[in-house]
Amino acid sequence: MTSTIEAPRSPYSRAPRSRGVNWEKWGWIYMRVSGVVLVVLIFGHLFVNLMVGEGVSALNFAFVAGKLTTPFWMVWDVLMLWLALIHGGNGMRTLVNDYATQRLTRGILKSAILAAVVILIVLGTLVVFTFDPCPAGSPADLLPSFCSAI
Amino acid sequence: MPEEIQSFTVTLIIRRYNPEVDDEPHWDDFDVQMYPTDRVLDALHKIKWEQDGSLSFRRSCAHGICGSDAMRINGRNRLACKTLIKDLDITKPVYVEAIKGLPLEKDLIVDMEPFFESFRAVQPFLVANNAPTDGKERIQTVAQRERFDDTTKCILCAACTSSCPVFWTDGQYFGPAAIVNAHRFIFDSRDDNAAVRLDILNDKEGVWRCRTTFNCTEACPRGIQVTQAISEVKQAMLRGME
């Protein structure tokens, strides 16, 4: 009730129209589309990992390794990684645009968000596609069952 | 002898600011004797006329149509002339302050210019490029009129725009009221400038900044479905006009 909301920080002059790609429009569309797809992907992920079969107690290295050798789950996980990180990154960008008042602060924060998103996407994608489910010298009872067949 | 109507004491705590004296706004409290059928505006009048003549606020018609006395009453944007005392919890003080996000000028008065600037920017007037078919009237079906009926109700009180958290952040967002008034002409079958208005709002500070928090719909004293109108403008941009 007594919260203070400051007067607008800049005078009321409207910036000239930006040219080129309409990032705000495509950002908005991306948030809607990725949001809908992520609802399916994330709840599917949670259901398969935590509820099917033995449930959460089945989760261990072997379980994850087994999933990451299946092309279906590789695509599922990579899709989830990309969509969720860009979705979150774009949301954070919106917050920075709203609340960072200085041009420099905005630049630094948005660069940091972009760097975090890019690094995590690259690392995550690399892990999924270069994953070794049967690392040499590991105890057999921790590895997926198919490792003994190799 | 008719039964006497019960009156009661209401405490109003008003956020005061006199730019010639104060560095910062401060809260003043006033006790007024009110009837259940009185409105917050009547309480403000009573204070101004009987207790403190320096209290400043805008009001013109005092009947909910001129849009002058939008203010923040108990944390919600309301028209003082449409808010009955009996609908508030009078066991506690009633907090009254100016609407937020616009420059405060004095007490309950803000500078409305940024708000009207956005309003003017969307071309809130009929643009018809050809003559009426029979030379007299531009005929419209009932359904065509119904399409934009809701957004014709706007009285430009700024209750919606000044309740919008996106507008609060930097005041650059066009704001719900400007979009509502664009909607009123975009969906008017007699108007020919929908594409121009959609183009104006299809920008960085336009409709895409709306986060659908519904503050505007909740604040509108005319009951306009503001958030829905904004969504319809977004849809028109994505799918074109049907």
Image (spheres, coloured by chain):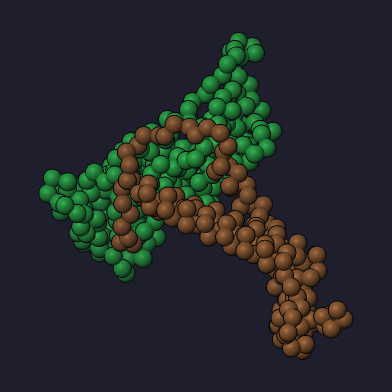
Chain colours: A brown, B green
Residue at (73%, 64%) from the top-left corner? A129
Task: Give B161 or A106, whichever is nearer the viewer.
Answer: A106
**At which x and y percent is residue A15?**
42, 34
Task: Give A43 or B168, whichever is nearer the viewer.
Answer: A43
Task: Give A55 or B25, whichever is nearer the viewer.
Answer: A55
Residue at (38%, 38%) from the top-left corner? B115
Quadrant for the N terminus of chain A in the image = bottom left
Quadrant for the C terminus of chain A in the image = bottom right
Quarter residue A57 falls in: bottom right
Task: Give A130 or B47, whichever is nearer the viewer.
Answer: A130
Quarter residue B173 falls in: top left
Whether residue B7 is visible, yes or no, is no
Eyeballing the image, is A83 above or below B197? below
Q: Is residue A26 left or right of residue A58?
A: left
Q: How many marks?
A: 0
Quarter residue A4 falls in: bottom left
Q: Is residue B195 left or right of residue A125?
A: left
Residue sitting farthest toward the front: A137
Residue sitting farthest toward the right: A149
Residue sitting farthest toward the top: B135
Q: Is residue A16 left or right of residue B31?
A: right
Residue at (59%, 12%) from the top-left corner? B131
**At which x and y percent is residue A56?**
70, 83
Whether residue A141 is visible, yes or no, is yes
**At which x and y percent is residue B233?**
58, 39
Residue at (24%, 56%) from the top-left corner? B14
Eyeballing the image, is B232 above or below B169? above
